[in-house]
Image: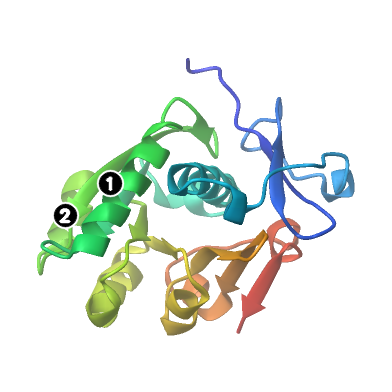
Amino acid sequence: MAGRRLPLLVPLAASFLVFHMHVQVHRPMDVEMATRLAGAAAPADLPESSVASRRAMVLTRALSYDATLGDRAGRAIVLLVLYKRRHAESEKCADVAGRAFKQIESLRVAGAPFRRLVVPYAADLEQTVETTAGDVVFLCDGLEGDLAAIKQVTRKKKVLTIGTTEAQVRAGVSLGLVAEGTKMTIVVNWTQCREEGATFGSDLLRLARVIR
């Protein structure tokens, strides 16, 4: 389904993010559509898999506003779901996130095919990134102690890091989608984005909490 389109990301009055179909992933965002859609279930009302699916869709949509992603990527945008072996919460996160991102592999990001791979963290992360042609790393729970080593690789290879908590973003992850009660909020670490080679424009930043 190469021609399938990714929904448009729009903010609701309460800052919850929902989607409107039929807008290509690489087209600019029309933020004036702000409250045309209403009544979406909040994260607290959804099962974990549904929250993960919504988060995966929003994060993937957000990637299309990285103006330099197409230049850094190859023929496809490859997202690595990175987890810690023998860590129950990390492995669970990888399973749920892996399935959520798998559901949107038929869509296109920044005009390119999208693929996700689930990989365990290891000391040879740089080789893993090179072998898989990874462009984005989604960080699962349990990798907090390894973040400094991970960031060394992502800065060197210009790979964008994304996560699910503001604590991750404040610690050095570039982009996060954080569930806060009944809403989801995009959080951007401006400095880390630049170090990983990403350039997000005002269309995304106006919807985000920006940490500088």
Residue of label 2: 128
Residue 123 on image: x %, y %: 10, 69
**Disc on res. 210:** none
Residue 33 on image: x %, y %: 87, 43
Residue 128 on image: x %, y %: 16, 54
SS for dot 2:
helix
Foreground pick, 57 / 142: 142
Mark 1 neighbour class, 10 Å CA radius: few under 14, some 14 to 19, many 20 or more: some
Between tags 1 and 2, which lies in front? 1
Task: Give the residue displayed 62% in from the left and 61% down from the top.
Answer: 200
Look at the image and tell me whether residue 81 can be seen. Answer: no
Amino acid on which the number 2 mark rests in the picture: Thr
Residue of label 1: 95
Q: In the rendered view, would you say 35 is above or below 44?
A: above
Mark 2 neighbour class, 10 Å CA radius: few under 14, some 14 to 19, many 20 or more: some
Q: In the rendered view, would you say 41 is above or below 104?
A: below
Task: Give the residue displayed 62% in from the left and 63% down from the top.
Answer: 186
Amino acid on which the number 1 mark rests in the picture: Asp
- Quadrant hosting residue 178: bottom right
Foreground pick, 13 / 199: 13
Look at the image and tell me whether residue 105 can be seen. Answer: yes
SS for dot 1:
helix
